[in-house]
Structures are given as structure tokens and as C-alpha cells.
Amino acid sequence: MPRKDLSNLKRTLEKATRKFESLGGPTEYPDPVVFCTEKLSLRPTEYQTKVLMDESKFLALRWSRQSGKTAVVSARLLWDAVRQPGTSIAIVSPSLRQSKQVLGRIASYARLLPTSLVSAIQKTRLEFTNASTIEAYPNNPDTIRGPSLDIVYCDEMGFIRNDQELYGAILFTLSSAKNGRFIASSTPGSKDNLFYKFCTDAKYGFSNHYVNWRDAVEPNGPLKREILEVIRAQLEPDPWRWRREMEAEFAESENSYFPLSLITSAIDESRAYTDFTEYISGKRLYVGLDFGKHHDHSAVGVVEHDPTTKMAALIHMHKFPLETEYGAVIGYVKRLVSTWKEVRKITTDETGIGDVVTEDMRNEGLRQTVGIGLNIQTKTDIMENLRNMLVKKELKLPYDPELIGEMNAEKFELNKAGQIQFSHPSGTHDDQLWALALACHGLREESRVPEYHPVVLTGYIIKPRIPYFTFGKEPWKRDPLYNQTARLCMACGARRPLTMPYCPKCGSGSDGPNPAFVKP
Ligand SMILES: Nc1ncnc2c1ncn2[C@@H]1O[C@H](COP(=O)(O)OP(=O)(O)O)[C@@H](O)[C@H]1O
Ligand SMILES: [Mg+2]
């Protein structure tokens, strides 16, 4: 070989070596803890260090809120990507939005690295010059099964709806990797969830890490004392939630009206709340409104209903700050109605001040507003309807931890008369739950098939609130069930709520007697 070519080759080789060194080959970051402290300015706590150093194939982190699970796993994944060329890493969580947030956290760490290491930072994907990638995935087993992955991280695993199926897909895709790993982190959710088994059943072979608020609070962990006090004030009235989210125990009250497993089964990973700016078409919308001012918040929930698939979904939820004027709440709903034209019905809580505000709303041109007085019977009816929709899988919810907490905190008890009495731990809120329940109630009322019944024949009690001449202008009021709360029994004349199919006194119903009726 001519001498000139040889020196050219030598120079090229030297250049390549320099470049490789600037990329930070494996020798530069031998240890994830050093990597965190020196490159990411993140000084891991003792329990975070244990996770960083844990090389197990399967890891489960059952940690309390704000203890730094997402932070430490993000850092470790970044280290894995940088150190091992060609590593494919996936992030899944109950919703794509949440997965993107985790990816955003990793991206913010990646920005601290030399630019020569990272080739692209996108919303759902990070690419590295050593051909490693980190990608945010929706919670969809089919999408996970597709690519061959080396590491999968599942954040808030305890709240994944189709966890069995997803885990199956993860195992499938990891089976072809040489050093496949799976990391799950979560605050405890329902005991029906796989995450519970990972944490408690040795058969699954997970390396378990458990951290509660005492471990996570300053100076040992990142949980600031003032944040702890805020969380304490928020959760203390609901001891079960405190135990789950801060003690990181799998604890759930037996008289939760909406068990966590039921709520989790309704979470639709692809959904996020819809913003005013987004356009909606082909759907019917139902608004639920719960009023509050000094002690409770006003909350508005919007449920969309697809008449062809008969599926409903919560698409919007807004909780107003305390002391918000009712006028502002009405203004918000007006804007909502003018943007999304298809609002069929606005159902409000007419109890107390709600009566006046509901009237105001109608006067303000929101003619589809219907107030409902909440008493023990209507409350049961409305809550039962929401629960039924969840049980029958007719309602989808986006992943909203606050709403999940509110729903699960709703307790029930049977009183002496056999009626269901609902209660919410005092000091906690259930405004969003009621906004959702009222919207679903409005939906059901409207989707009942209107039939024409002469008043005398059916025994419907017509409240004289709707002047008959409004019928033509406001078609929803043509429904004979509109604004009705009770009917009379055709056999004995007793009064009963509309939702009760059989008479409580004599047991007869419109389709014959109640087979389960026992004479009092
Ligand atoms: N080792 C640490 N040092 C300093 N701050 C940290 C550390 N670990 C986490 N944090 C911070 O604590 C907060 C909570 O962390 P995060 O990972 O979001 O908690 P979790 O996912 O457990 O709710 C974040 O602001 C994060 O930046
Ligand atoms: Mg987190």
C-alpha cells in the first residue's frame, strides 16, 4: 500500500476514535449512579440507588406519590440507551398522554447530555447516535407486540385496564431480546390488578422495591414537607386513599360504591379530555353540572354519546376554584354550548342554591337545562345509573387520577329502610363525580324511547312547570318522561319514583307483577 494511503487511513481512524470517545462509549459512564449525579445533576436517594443498581429482569416499584419513581426510572433508561448501542426502549402507561409525559422527563435529562449523543428529540420518540431509541407507546397490546424491544417500562401499572393482555404482549416482545427487562412502577391500585400480583406473589419473579412517604420525605427523599402537608390535607379525610397513595399499601374500603377494579376497567387509554378548541361532530353531548361555592367546588362534566355504537365517554371535566361566582360557571357552560353545538341536555343539581342558578341558566338561553332535586331516591337512581353504565362497559373514562380518587371515595351503606345512603368522607370532594353522574343521568333520560301515553292511562304525574306552548319549540320536552319524578301505581294508586319498575306497595308493574315481590 502506498505510504500516502496509509497515513490517510491512520488519520481517518484517529478521527473516528476521537468521535467515538466524544460520544461517551461504555467506559465513560460505568455506573448509573455516577451518571445520574455527574451528567443529570440528580442525586439519587438511597432507595433510588437500589433501583439503579438492580439488574433483575423484572422490577416492580410500589412507591408512594412524589417519591421519585418516574425520575429514577427515566434516568436509568437514559443510561441504558446511552451505554448499550442499539437498545430499543418502550414506555407504556394508562394513557398515551402519560407515556409522553414520562418521555418528556427523559428528554429533559437527555438535553443535559453532549449533543453528539442524542440525534433527535420528538414528542413520542428519542433517538440516539448509537442507534438506541426510547419511544412512548399507547397502552395497546397490538402496538407493543409489533417491534422487538429490549426494555419496557410501565408507569402507573396499577391503573392499566387490560393489564393481562398488555403484559402478555410485553413478554412476547421481550422474549426475543437478549437482555430483555421489564420495569413496572405504580402507587397501589386494585387488588384485581396484575401489579398486585407482581408485588405479592413470588411466582411472578419480580424484584420488589417498596417505598412509603416516610422514606420519601425530606431529607431522605424528594418529597417536600409542604407538599406532604398539602397532600395530607387533601387525602387525610379518606384514610383508604391515604393508605394507598402515601403508605403505598393495597388497601380499599369494602363499601366503596365504585371499586377501583370497576373504575380501572372503564379507563380508555386512548382518551384525553377534549379542549374547547377541538371540534366535535356526529356525537350527542350531555352536560352535568354540580354547584358549589364556599366549601365545595362547582364542576362541569361533558359526556358524549354515539347513537350508533351506544357508547358514551367522558370528554371534558372542569372543576372551578372555590369562591367562583355562579355567573362565571354559567358563562363557561354557555361558551361550551356555543362551541359544541350538539349539547342535548344540561342536567344540574337543583338542590339548595342550584334551583335559582338552574332558573338563571334557562333565562340565559340555555333552554336544554334540566334541574333535578337530589334526595335519597334520586341520588340512588343517579349513582346506580352511573354504576350500571360502568358495569355494562357503556362508559369510557380518560385516565384522570383525581376523578378515580373521587369516585372510589364514594361510600355507601344500607339504612334501616333498605335504601342506599351515599356518603363521602367529610373534607374530601365529590363534585366531579356528581358532574359525571348528572351528565350520564341526562343521557339516559333522553335515550329512553319516548312513547305517547295519555296522562290518565299511565298515571304520570305532570308537574305544571312546562307551559304546553313550549312543546313545539323545545323538542326534548315532548318526551313524556321529561321532568317527571314519579308515577302512580295503576293497581293501588301508590306513588313511586319513575325508575322503580314495580310498585313497592303491591308489587305490580307495567309488565305484570314483580316475581320477587313479598307481601308486606
Ligand atoms: N433524587 C432526587 N433528587 C431531587 N429531586 C428528585 C429526586 N427524585 C425525584 N425528584 C423530584 O421529585 C418530584 C417527584 O418525582 P416523580 O418522579 O415525579 O415522582 P413519582 O413519579 O413517584 O410521583 C419531581 O419533581 C422530581 O424531579
Ligand atoms: Mg410518576
Image (spheres, helix red, strand yellow):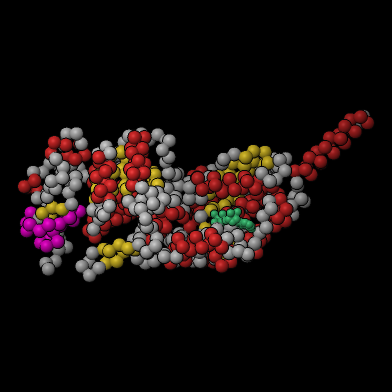
489 falls in the magenta region: no
- Magenta segment boundaries in residue numbering: 490-507
Residue 85 image position (x, y, % from top left)? 69, 45
- In the rendered image, which quarter contains the C terminus? bottom left
Is 449 left, or right, of 171 in this rendering? left
Q: Nearer the viewer, residue 158 or 453?
A: 453
Q: How many marks?
A: 0
Using residue 369 as the reference point, say whether residue 239 is left or right of it: right
Q: Residue at x 59, y 48 (%)?
A: 105
Q: Position of residue 505 (x, y in %)?
A: 11, 62
Q: Is residue 502 magenta?
A: yes
| As drawn, 51 above or below 103 | below
Q: At 67% across and 55% down in the image, what residue appears?
A: 42
Taking the spot 68% from the left edge, 41% from the top edge, the residue there is 118
Q: In the image shown, does 210 or 392 lie closer to the viewer?
A: 210
Give me the residue at 74% from left, 54% from top.
Answer: 30
Is residue 367 something that shows in the picture?
A: yes
Q: Position of residue 190 (x, y in %)?
A: 44, 61
Camera-nearest residue between 210 and 481 = 481
Q: Quadrant of the N terminus?
A: top right
Question: Farthest residue toward the bottom?
Answer: 416
Where, by quadrant of the figure, is residue 37 drawn?
A: bottom right
Q: Quadrant of ligand 1?
A: bottom right
